[in-house]
Amino acid sequence: MISRAKSEALFAEALNHIPGGVNSPVRAFRAVGGQPFFVNKAKGCRVTTVDGDELIDYVGTWGPAILGHAHPKIIKAVQDTAAHGTSFGIPNPLEVTMAKLICASAPSVHKVRMTNSGTEACMSAIRLARGFTKREKIIKFDGCYHGHTDSLLVRAGSGALTFGNPDSAGVPAAFTQHTIVLPYNDVDAVKAAFAANPGQIAGIIVEPVPGNAGLYLPKPGYLEFLSQITTQDGALLIFDEVMTGFRLALGGAQQRFGITPDLSCFGKIIGGGLPVGAFGGRAEIMDCLAPLGPVYQAGTLSGNPLAMAAGIANLEELQMGGAYGQLEELGQQLAEGMSSAAKAANIPLTVNHCGSMFCGYFTSEPVWNLADAMKADRERFKKFFHGMLNEGVYLAPSQFESGFISVAHTPADIEATASAAAKVMKSL
Ligand SMILES: *Cc1c(COP(=O)(O)O)cnc(C)c1O
């Protein structure tokens, strides 16, 4: 059992001053019941709670911690940079380094603009796609999450999905009337949408490997199809790689699946744990942004030196090589471990994984889209989640989130996780 006294006292105080006690809803543990624990330090693949328990962490601050927590190079980069100032509001050299790193890693990105979050990146990419094509409609997919922007918060994944009210209050219907929502992995649905809206679709925004409703993979040929139909129609293909960028390969899902999107969104890993986002793509499109073009986009802290320093350290370390091969192996080991744990306990579990991302759905059927994911037994997930926590393993507190492995996880950590899963599955 993990200890709770200090976390409980902090949460009681937090509830008085922060809505729901948290600054982002999934952290409140509503999907699994109970209360969140508080963490005040983390190192490698482990987080330490304020009550002193060390947990093997598969949340990895929701993706950024691909090198593990408190990587010495990132900490040093932030400290060294902070000594010279925390923000200048005028170009700084680190912005150029960061832009070059992103463009070199994802060749579809010729130019890139930094933002402060993935939400801003997606919001701005959509505006840019509309400004460039002079069209208004956007296609998004069920269960894909592109941040909490009004027009994209329709049947979205992540917290919005977990709480069963994907459409947020406070979003006027008029703001989403140009958003067409389709099931993922369904070619005919996309064809029908283009046929019904000729010359009106500005673009498709998609998580190439959706990781905000658990995790499901594109069917063979699906991403190629999205690329072809957008090209034929004069619409743009926007890959939201906020989660998959620098995660599934140095060049993200687009490298892994060999697709060239028109625009890409990044976040999470490129900030090395500091608040960052970015969007980029073909130069002719990106040059429509202010100050060159008519599409306005800005940010007081965009390109912030501390965030750039942390991100650059993260990306440079990943560029050195070795990380992705290691992550593939660890991902494979964990997927096999979870599957055999379920089999031994006679529990139906569909394990989806891609590189270092994974999700075990408590269902016997394959999961290719949101409708499939919704068939998972969430009551069973709740018990599994708390069982794993008591064994010292921290999984995302929802059936509809992807897990993340870092290079700081060792085969022994994965083995320990699989053993914990075997024990917990037997008790379900
Ligand atoms: C996390 C995420 C976002 C939003 O990024 P924030 O930094 O939380 O605003 C957008 N798209 C995807 C695919 C994400 O996983």
Image: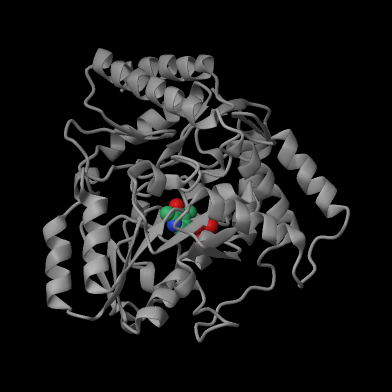
Image-based side of 124 in relation to 362, left or right: right
Q: Position of residue 129 (x, y in %)?
A: 39, 74
Along the line of sight, the residue nearer the viewer: 264 or 412: 264
Total labels: the figure holds 0
245 shown above or below 265: above
Residue occupying image coordinates x 23% and y 48%: 369
In the rendered view of the protein, which quadrant contains the C terminus? top left
159 shown above or below 133: above
Q: Position of residue 337 (x, y in %)?
A: 36, 18
Residue occupying image coordinates x 63% and y 46%: 272
- Whether residue 57 is visible, yes or no, is no
- Whether residue 151 is visible, yes or no, is yes
Residue occupying image coordinates x 65% and y 41%: 316
Residue sitting at the far bottom? 294
Q: Position of residue 365 (x, y in %)?
A: 16, 34
Q: Position of residue 382 (x, y in %)?
A: 36, 35
Image-based side of 28 in relation to 355, left or right: right
In the rendered view of the protein, which quadrant contains the N terminus? top right
Residue occupying image coordinates x 44% and y 30%: 386
Along the line of sight, the residue nearer the viewer: 182 or 303: 303
